[in-house]
Image (cartoon, grey):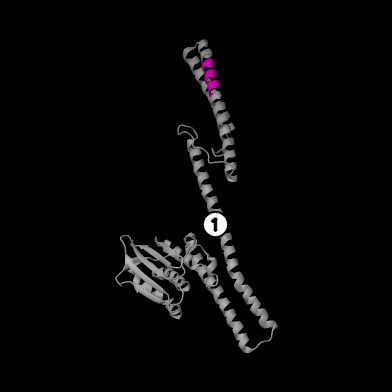
Amino acid sequence: MTTAKLSINKACIMVCTLLVLLFASMISALYLLTDDINMIWVGLLFSALVYLCFMLLIVLIRRKLTAFSDHLCRQLDDMMTGEIEPPQVAEEENLFYKINHRLVRLYAVMQDKRCSIDKERADLQELISDISHQIKTPIANLKMVNATLLEKSMTEEKQKEFLLACGGQLDKLDFLMQAMIKTSRLEAGVISLKKKKQPIYDTLAAALGGILLNAEQKHIDVEVDCTEKLEVFHDQKWTSEALFNILDNAVKYTPSNGNIHVVAENLEMYLKISITDTGKGIAEQNQGAIFKRFYREEQVHDTPGIGIGLYLAREIISMQSGYIKVTSEIGKGSIFSVFLPHE
């Protein structure tokens, strides 16, 4: 019989049997050595007392173990259902201190996991709701245009106009999907940013290249103040993406004949890139919300966009241990400051 399969009851019986045999052997040895019948009675009395003390100890330990196991099972059941507060840590001299201490740690881990799962579930539901809201309008427009083209006869010029409208809605859906793919890959850690010390000038130039045409069409003057010697640890591709998203917003919400001023400067611990525009500005109570996914102010729904650019920009900069600060005033434009650490 292996010790792993040996029950407590059987172990107690075996120990008791061994004690009886030990006492019998001891009494027999005393009688043989002394040849005195009184030694047998003394030995029996001593053996009975020791045996009684041992049995009382066994009963006490058994009751303690039974009570502890019942209490432990109840605690574990309640912890799994989240119906109790974390168990208190026992005193260090307590026999069950180690078990109780690990029980507290187990409960803390379970609570953290539960909170993490609840947060992920809430984020997923919010994401599904946001995506559903974003694709609802383009799909409805595409269905309407498709039904019109199928059911009504129209000139070739009118058909071309409807097809161009379809193309615009498809572009919006494609942009949404591309933005979501980038965001999900960043959040899931599929894409790892590769930081190295390199000039910010080239990164800024790549970002500006994507907005110059739109700025020119709106007659917006773009000024850049950045020397080629400024260097900082960053991922050029994704930092350029973040800066482009901020610059693109500046162009969208700056009226014609406005100005955008970009300045890059070295601070003690950070490299700071300030993007100043003469747009409509952002109300102070909304400045914290503009970095949320799909957030757009009610006043700008007529302006093209889906409200994910700033969210993506913040994620990219945060992954590089940097941050974005915004200061703005209604009617006087906005300043988005990007801070990238030197190390």
Q: Residue furthest left?
A: 229
Instruction: Specify the segment rendered in magenta.
Output: 43-54
Residue 276: % across, % down: 40, 69
Of 18 and 271, the residue lying toward us: 271
Residue indicated by mark 1: 120
Residue 155, compared with residue 18, is above or below; it is below
Whether 249 is among the magenta residues is no
Give residue 156's quadrant in the image: bottom right
Residue 23, compared with residue 290, is above or below; it is above
Question: Which residue is depicted at the point 40% across and 77% down?
Answer: 221
Can residue 190 be seen? no
Whether 50 is among the magenta residues is yes
Residue 132: % across, % down: 60, 66
Question: Which residue is depicted at the point 64% across and 79% down?
Answer: 145
Pointer 1 local density, CA inside 10 Å: few below 14, some 14–19, many at least 20: few
Q: Quadrant of the C terminus?
A: bottom left
How many numbered marks does the figure carry?
1
Can residue 266 be seen? yes
Disc 1 marks a residue whose amino acid type is Glu
